[in-house]
Structure formats: structure tokens, C-alpha cells
Image: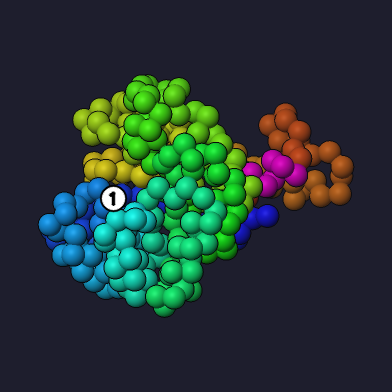
């Protein structure tokens, strides 16, 4: 399958409350790969309409440089959802993030609504996976529409729905995280890890970033600007990984046609070459950000 053709950096994806104009202004200076301008959890009922106007103005302003800008709308069934979706579609952000997407049919309905509202071609759907229903349907969700570009893990809601606890290592979530990763990779779309709640626990946050990277996530959603630097560093290839990738490709090219190629005493096969190319593509994309 596979829709993704070029690497889009999404190492750090920061939620920003769209009701806070100062926060939206500050976001223009942060070294994040992407922003999610939030109309949902971070915004109280009395501020929903103002937040919608702020987010749409920001998304269409062109003032966020090479940061990818997405808008998170209120969920299907809420009184704000339809107006949020129509306004966000007209603003034309890179992504429209929808909470609690539970089925492939819901994805197709959302895509139809985006297209009916005149969303430009570059505006893609980002589906939040945060319920047991979504986990059981995640394979169908991931492959349901070419307009779906990203799965976003909603780990807080998932923990709540499971009646589980937030614990180091996230044992209660491992099945859900891995099933979602499998679905995203089969469909060729991106997938973002959930947030880390304790903004003062630097060690715990870094450990969870490393876990997410090792699992295969493209990046992590964040709730505080102070988390950005560690997240970017963790999800970018290390100097050692870049050097190893270059060495593998050099050995492969030098040994073309020889049958067996080795690098640092290890056999190199096509799969190692593919991994090396991905490492270097990622390095080039994030270099200088």
C-alpha cells in the first residue's frame, strides 16, 4: 500500500491553545516541526468561537515559516464541530486534526465534509486514535482514504477509557501503540506518539521519547515548549547513525555486482540500504531546523 512518498519532519508536534493569542505569537519562534492549533481540550466553551477565528487566521497567515500548521477541531457530535470543520477547511492548514475517530466510515464522512467545504488539496486529515473502538478498527481507519495523512495517538483518553494508569514504560498501552503503528506502516501514513503530562519530569519525558522513537513513531505530540528540544534531538538521527548510514551506502555502491557486501564486518543487504537511505533522508530534512 503506502501513500507517503517524501519525508515530512514531524519530530515535535506542539499543541497550542488557540484562545491564547500570545501563545500563537510565541509559536512563530519555537523550533517545532509542527503545531496543532487547538480548538478542543485546551479551550473553554466560552472561548470556542474566538479560538476558531484565531486558529484560522494563524493557519492562513503564512507567518509560521517551515513549521507545519494543523488545526484540531472539536469532535463529531459536539455543537462546534460542523462550524470548526468548515472554517478550518476554508483556512487551508496542512492538517485538520479530528478527535476520537472510531471507524473508516467516519474518516470517509470527514473527508467528504472537508471537500464539500472547499478544503484545498494540501489540507489533509489527521485522525486521533484514542478509544477502544478506534484500536479495534485502526487498520481499516489507516487505509480508508488517500486524504488521511497522519494518525495521532490520544494516549490520555485511551488510558481513561481503559481504566488504566499512566506508568513508566506504558505497559497498559503497548498493545494499542503497536497495533496503531502496524496499521500506519501498512497504509504508508505517518503516526505520532501521545503527550507526556508531567512537564517537570525531564528524565521521564526523555525516556518516553526514546521509547516512541524505538517503537517507530515519526514524532511525538507535546504540551509544553520546554519539551521541544529533547524531542527534536531524540527523533533525529544521531551523528553516529548518519555516519553508519553513509558507510553502508558507500560500501553498497563500491560492491555493486559483487554479490556479497560488508561494512564494519557485517553483511549488507537491500534492507540495510533502505534503512540507511531513510536515515539520511531524515537527516537532510531536519538539518538546520
* Placement of 48 over or under 242, stated as above or below: below
Percent across and percent down for residue 66 are 36, 64
Horizontal side of 270 relative to 65 (left or right) equals right
Query: Who's the residue at 84% across and 38% down the image?
Result: 260
Q: Within the magenta stretch, is there residue 158?
A: no
Residue 27: x and y in percent read 23, 57
Image quadrant where residue 39 sits = bottom left
Q: Main secondary structure of the magenta part?
A: helix
Task: Give, as a single range, the part of the protein colored magenta.
Answer: 270-276
Q: How is the image coloured?
A: rainbow
Q: Image height check: is 5 above or below 153?
A: below
Q: Is residue 242 visible?
A: no
- What residue is pinned by disc 1? 15
Mark 1: give few (<14), some (14-19) or many (20+) Cα within 10 Å.
many
Residue lying at 34% horizontally and 36% vertically, measured from the top left: 156
Q: Nearer the viewer, residue 164 or 195?
A: 164
Identify the residue shown where x is 40% and y is 75%: 117
Image spot of residue 181 (x, y percent) = 55, 40
Amino acid at each position: 500500500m503506502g501513500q507517503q512518498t517524501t519525508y515530512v519532519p514531524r519530530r515535535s508536534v506542539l499543541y497550542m491553545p488557540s484562545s491564547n493569542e500570545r501563545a500563537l505569537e510565541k509559536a512563530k519562534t519555537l523550533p517545532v516541526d509542527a503545531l496543532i492549533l487547538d480548538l478542543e481540550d485546551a479551550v473553554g466553551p466560552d472561548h470556542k468561537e474566538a479560538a476558531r477565528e484565531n486558529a484560522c487566521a494563524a493557519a492562513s497567515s503564512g507567518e509560521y515559516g517551515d513549521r507545519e500548521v494543523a488545526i484540531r477541531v472539536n469532535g463529531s457530535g459536539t455543537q462546534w464541530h460542523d462550524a470548526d470543520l468548515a472554517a478550518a477547511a476554508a483556512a487551508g492548514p496542512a492538517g485538520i486534526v479530528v478527535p476520537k475517530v472510531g471507524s473508516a466510515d467516519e474518516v470517509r464522512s470527514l473527508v467528504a465534509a472537508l471537500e464539500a467545504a472547499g478544503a484545498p488539496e494540501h489540507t489533509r486529515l489527521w485522525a486521533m486514535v484514542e478509544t477502544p473502538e478506534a484500536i479495534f478498527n485502526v487498520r481499516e481507519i489507516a487505509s480508508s482514504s488517500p486524504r488521511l495523512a497522519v494518525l495521532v495517538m490520544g494516549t490520555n483518553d485511551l488510558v481513561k477509557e481503559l481504566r488504566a494508569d499512566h506508568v513508566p514504560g506504558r505497559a497498559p498501552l503497548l498493545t494499542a501503540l503497536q497495533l496503531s503503528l502496524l496499521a500506519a506502516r501498512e497504509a504508508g501514513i505517518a503516526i505520532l506518539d501521545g503527550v507526556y503530562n508531567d512537564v517537570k519530569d525531564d528524565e521521564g519525558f526523555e525516556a518516553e521519547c526514546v521509547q516512541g522513537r524505538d517503537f517507530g513513531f515519526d514524532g511525538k505530540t507535546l504540551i509544553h515548549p520546554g519539551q521541544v528540544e529533547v524531542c527534536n534531538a531524540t527523533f533525529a538521527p544521531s551523528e553516529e547513525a548518519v555516519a553508519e548510514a553513509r558507510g553502508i551506502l558507500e560500501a553498497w555502491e563500491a560492491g555493486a555486482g559483487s554479490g556479497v557486501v560488508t561494512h564494519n564486518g557485517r553483511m549488507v543487504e537491500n534492507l540495510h540500504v533502505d534503512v540507511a537511505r531513510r536515515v539520511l533522508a531524515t537527516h537532510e530534512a531536519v538539518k538546520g531546523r
